[in-house]
Image (tube, rainbow, N blue to C red):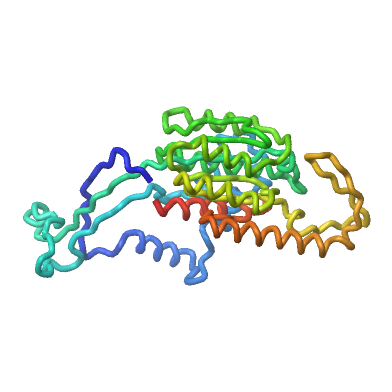
Amino acid sequence: MHREGAQSSTERKPVHNLNSYDVAEKENRKKEGAGDTAAPVGSSAKARFLDPDVLSRIGSLELLARTVVEASWRGCIVRRTRVFDGICGVPAVSAGRRFTLPDWRLYGRTDRYFIKKYRADTNTQCQIAVDTSASMRYGSGAVTKLQYAQFLAAAIAHLVARQQDSVGLLTFDSEVRTHVPAHSKTGHLRTILGHLSQIEAGGETQLAKMLHEAADRFTRRSVVVVVSDFYEDPEALGPAFQHLRFKGHDVIAFHVLDKNEIDFDFKDAILLLEDVETEEQMPVLPDVIADGYRTRMRDHLTSLREMASANRVDYELIRTDRALDYALFTFLARRSRY
């Protein structure tokens, strides 16, 4: 990513001390008594606050985003840094090595060796693209796919803004409905959350076309987060992702699906299926078509994964009954590469 306004600071740390992060991790494991089988962050009590059913009862999207991020990343440092270490452990150095990083003034005062560390902050731009087509309206539980997409987009926007990076929003179905250019200025997060809270599902899906348009709109290299149910031909999506990658964007695709769309676990003897985009209805026998449906869904998901891998797109399948911390940690892991 572009480096803007890089600053350097000196962080003094005794060379003989253990890494503070490692010490904290060991202490946490001792307290939890988890050993090597420690539960991931976001489990137990935190998971209750990240459960979609619980989050759906929070009226304010700003409060929801703050709740999710604080519950998932309390004590975590997200900003990317480049750290250059000096001498570690002993004063002696090999011949020809530059001897400039130890803090000799501090050594003269304390008779102990310290390491100078230089930190250069990076300014990342994140663009969040949310599919608002009619198919996102579906939900078999307390949360629809669109609501889950709102929760996820709001939490990511809050996370990025808290790190003082730029964040923008694009919502679309068959055309662009909302475009908020990326900024990091004060109050910009509330603008994005306000637009997110007002979106409604409607219109047909034209995901490939919209991704091409997004690639033309996003002029600066960014982390592009696409949140959609991806009901689009993978062969059509391939060139669209290539377009984004050609423009230098790093793309993360969150494939949001309801559990019934994946498992097709219906107990009704006769089921009336309706295409929410065309309103076409079809009565079916779940026991008869279930195996065929699951096979076609597996094939579709496999094709999407292969297409994403071929175009160097980070693809994650997210169920609406899964806690948000999983998706957010995925975003954090991808973002840490910068």
Name the image quarter holding residue 186. top left
336 to the left or right of 251: left
Residue 300, quarter of picture: bottom right
Q: Is residue 65 visible?
A: no
Residue at (80% x, 60% y) in the render = 293
Q: Residue 90, image x and y in percent?
A: 15, 68
Q: Horizontal placement of 76 versus 129: left or right?
A: left
Nearer to the camera, 63 or 316: 316
Above/below status of 255 relative to 289? above
Estimate the x, y position of residue 79 in percent, counting from the top left: 38, 47
In the image: residue 206, left or right of residue 187: right
Name the one closer to the observer, 26 or 1: 1
> How far across and down, in percent of the image, does residue 200 sit?
69, 33
Residue 224 visible from this viewpoint: yes
Residue found at x 60% / y 33%: 196
Query: Measuring 40% from the left and 66% from the top, which residue is drawn there?
Result: 26
Q: Quadrant of residue 315?
A: bottom right
